[in-house]
């Protein structure tokens, strides 16, 4: 009995089939890298003053500036304009101001300084606002995993 072999019937067709299978394999392998999304799962941390703050699960970041006046009185400095702050300096020669980053239920005291005039207070607030901008940029960047605050 004669055994039929497809390759003997049309040798050109066999070569075309092998080339097509080869091209299909290259096409499938090239698609494996396309369309994949990168998932960054590394923990986000902030390093400040020798402390490490894990920011991976933080839902809300806020800020405040507290003025500590004599007699255990605490004033929200963010609600005061320049005239209000200067009035506090006229009433009290100097007082403590703390700038604080709120991270859900945790707090990071960014700076706690005795101030005696508006220019020192203003510099302190500008430095704090720049740090908050750095934190916001850091949290928005999916690739960065650590921020070192100054």
Image (tube, helix red, strand yellow):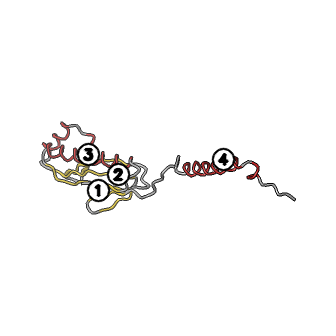
Q: Nearer the viewer, residue 58 or 65?
A: 58
Q: Which residue is mark 3?
A: 130
Q: Crowding near pointer 3: few (<14 within 10 Å), some, many (20+)?
A: few
Of marks 2 and 3, which one's residue comes earlier in the chain? 2
Lower sequence index among marks 4 and 2: 4
**Marks 4 and 3, Cα distance to the nearest angstrom?**
66 Å
Q: CA distance from mark 2 to mark 3?
A: 15 Å
Q: Earlier in the sequence, mark 1 or mark 4?
A: 4
Q: CA distance from mark 1 to mark 4?
A: 61 Å
Circles 2 and 1: CB distance less than 8 Å?
Answer: no
Query: Comparing marks 1 and 4, which lies closer to the viewer?
Result: 4
Element assignment for label 3 = helix
* x then y, percent, for residue 65: 26, 47
Q: Which residue is label 2 attached to? A: 102
Residue 99: x, y in percent? 26, 50
Q: Position of residue 120 (x, y in %)?
A: 15, 46
What residue sits right under mark 4 in the picture? 16
SS at badge 2: strand
Residue at horizontal 19 percent and vertical 53 percent from the top: 113
Mark toward the start of the polypeptide (1 vs 3): 3
């Amino acid at each position: 009995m004669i055994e039929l072999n497809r390759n003997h019937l049309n040798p050109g067709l066999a070569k075309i089939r092998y080339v097509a299978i080869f091209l299909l394999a290259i096409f499938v392998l090239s698609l494996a890298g396309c369309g994949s999304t990168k998932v960054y799962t590394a923990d986000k941390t902030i390093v400040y003053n020798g402390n490490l703050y894990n920011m991976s699960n933080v839902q809300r970041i806020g800020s405040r500036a507290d003025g500590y006046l004599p007699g255990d009185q605490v004033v929200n400095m963010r609600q005061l304009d320049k005239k209000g702050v200067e009035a506090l300096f006229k009433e009290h020669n100097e007082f403590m101001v703390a700038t604080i980053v709120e991270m859900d239920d945790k707090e990071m005291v960014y700076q706690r300084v005795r101030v005696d005039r508006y220019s020192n207070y203003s510099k302190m607030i500008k430095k704090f606002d720049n740090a908050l901008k750095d934190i916001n940029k850091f949290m928005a960047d999916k690739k960065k995993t650590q921020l070192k605050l100054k």
